[in-house]
Amino acid sequence: MFTRQRARQLFAFAVFIILASLDNAAMGVLPPLYAIIARDLQASDAALGSVTAVYLLVVAGAAVLWGYRGDQQKRKPLLFWGTLVWVAAMLLTTLSTNITQFLLFQMITAVGVGGISSLGFSVVSDLVPARRRGLALSLWSVSQGIGASFGALLAGTVGAFDWRYPFWTIAAIGLLFALLFLLTREPLRGRAEPELEPIFAQGKQYNFRISRSDIKLILQQASNRWLLLQSFFYALAYGSTVWIPRWAIARVQAEGYDLETATIVGNLIIALLSLGGFTAVLSGHLGDWWQQRSSRGRVKLAMIGTFVSAPLYVWLYLIPFRNLDLPEPATLWQLVTAVLQAFVTNEWVILAFLVAFTAVTFQSADPPNWSAMITDVNLPEHRGTVIGLSRVFRAVGNAISVWLAGWLFAFLTGQLPEPDNYAVGLSLFQILVIPALLCYLILQRHIAADRQAVIQKLTSRAQNPEN
């Protein structure tokens, strides 16, 4: 039955999901504009890549602090103020006249974004029943992909005329949903756990909160250690993909088009190549189904997806965009029409789409199932903190990957012409998928026992809430 309480939960879930997408839009708007912002601020592509690397590290550090505070107190006020911080900083970024100012305002943006990544995850885990955790977190994952694609699409279209437009747009939408967020109710901590149902049935609340000593316990748990390490290697392999728009732009430029046209067309192509990310919803649902039949179902699905996607990405990077037929000069809508036509008439673009769709589909099995696993093996009052910690591991991997990729592309430029330097450089990073897979292999030995330990702890607390 669709009750008022259920309607409130769905509204809150929708607002949190959109907020999660917007913080990724704030992150995704920069890479497609590297060339244009670098020219405007008289900086280099490598310098803008360094801004992204530092940005990711600040997001991670902030996520730990926001997440820990959220595990101690109410999360709604923290989420609201965190959103306002990044909205204001996005607006200030557009006032930058040099790379130093740009870096400063982007770091402030990162502080606010860090709050959404950890606090929002903690809230969503309390909104959805445990048996549907993979599906819910797949929607969370898809929203992040949509947000990143939205930011990149804004950057590659209106941003080609003035790089400030996407920043203004995302900040305005963020402010709107921050205000809508005030209309939601924060879910009760632990409400989604079936083992705690006796507590809530009596009208009581789950009152356990994290303490500093708990951080040591979190890191001592085997499943947490291997999931965190896996996230590092996964980010090391795929963090370099923030340069994919630059690869696509270079592919278009190689066909004889200028930077502005290539920026629009390259980013439109990337947006369409990313459509496979929507299949994460199916991956989350499949993870729920498999997990109910096997205690290692989620980890096996994530392994298969990661293993298959890596060689497909290498194939994608080596595909050229030959025989493009683009009007020049042209309006935005003329270029959009030309790109859409290419996706049904140009054999190279069609091949790239099919390979990319398959690669992204398999890769999409990892994020929602990884998130469901980290949720399953941690107590409700630990989840914001552990997700914050995961952001550190992932951000370090991403930052190293983005930074190394920038310098690798620069080095390869002396050996290979554009866009071959981007294609070869991006392909080399797929080797780092191997240690990520090894982490999953080891995780299989521990995850069932660690999940059972959490269930037993919650069951005990439901029977004796004071312990």
Image (cartoon, rainbow, N blue to C red):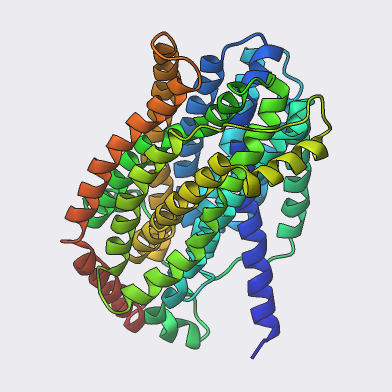
Left or right: 344 in relation to 58? right
The residue lying toward the viewer, choosing from 240 and 395, is 240
- Is residue 206 at all visible to an observer of this figure? no
The picture places residue 459, in percent across and down from the top left corner, at 31, 79
The picture places residue 331, in percent across and down from the top left corner, at 84, 32
Residue lying at the far bottom in this picture: please name it: 1
Q: Quadrant of residue 335?
A: top right
The picture places residue 161, in percent across and down from the top left corner, at 79, 26
Residue displayed at 23% across by 70% down: 453
In the depicted structure, whether residue 436 falls above or below residue 246: below
Left or right: 121 in relation to 24? left
Quadrant (top left/top right/bottom left/bottom right) for the C terminus: bottom left
- Is residue 177 at all visible to an observer of this figure? yes
Total number of numbered labels? 0
Q: Quadrant of residue 158?
A: top right
The residue lying toward the viewer, choosing from 223 and 365, is 365
Left or right: 110 in relation to 315? right
In the depicted structure, whether residue 298 falls above or below residue 424: below
The picture places residue 448, in percent across and down from the top left corner, at 22, 68
Residue displayed at 64% across by 50% down: 344
In the depicted structure, whether residue 167 falls above or below residue 425: below
Left or right: 193 in relation to 452? right
The residue lying toward the viewer, choosing from 125 and 457, is 125
